[in-house]
Image (cartoon, helix red, strand yellow):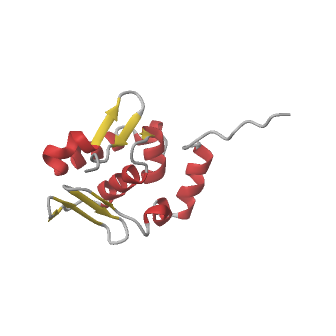
Amino acid sequence: MRQRSKKPAWPVDTLRNNITLGVHSLLPSLDQHYYSDSHLLVHPRHQVVMLDDQTIALTRMEYLLLALLVEHAGEVVPRPALLMQIWGCTPEIGGQRADQHIHRLRKKLGVYAEHYIETVPGVGYRFRPAPGP
């Protein structure tokens, strides 16, 4: 009998289990790594975000949202997954939380916002890293 491969990313039970572990468990793979390009630096271990060599003041939720998107760079992160990972709630309860925080985060990213954070209509958001040199 042939086994099916497991579904990739974002099963709700796994997300709920992560929530019970607390926010610090959200970004384990980024603990030792950071994202950097010619404009943006996101350093999870130090919780620093810099844009064009200037530190950006982000709220805790904006930072967690950006760090989660960066951790899954290039992948679409569904809205329900964002709500479950960051706020511990479902779309029925969380409503427009993710959308509101994405809007504020984009304001802080300024002219680079549309490049870095892509909206995938009806699905979620994707962090797009800058092309390599």
At a point 40% along the width and 27% down the height, the residue shown is: 122
Question: Where is residue 30 drawn, in percent x and y?
Answer: 43, 63
Question: Where is residue 72 drawn, in percent x and y?
Answer: 43, 49
**Which picture quadrant has residue 58?**
bottom left
Q: Is residue 59 left or right of residue 78?
A: left
Q: Is residue 14 left or right of residue 37?
A: right
**Which picture quadrant has residue 49?**
bottom left
Q: In what quadrant of the picture does the N terminus appear?
A: top right
Q: Is residue 133 above or below residue 2?
A: below
At a point 40% along the width and 53% down the height, the residue shown is: 68
Name the one closer to the observer, 107 or 39: 39
At a point 17% along the width and 51% down the height, the residue shown is: 108
Seen from this angle, which residue lies furthest bottom?
Answer: 46
Seen from this angle, which residue lies furthest top?
Answer: 122
At a point 60% along the width and 55% down the height, the residue shown is: 17
Name the one closer to the observer, 75 or 12: 75
Question: Where is residue 80 drawn, in percent x and y?
Answer: 47, 40
Seen from this angle, which residue lies furthest front?
Answer: 133
Q: Is residue 98 left or right of residue 92?
A: left
**How many numbered marks appear?**
0
Question: Where is residue 3 drawn, in percent x and y?
Answer: 78, 37
Q: Is residue 39 above or below residue 93?
A: below
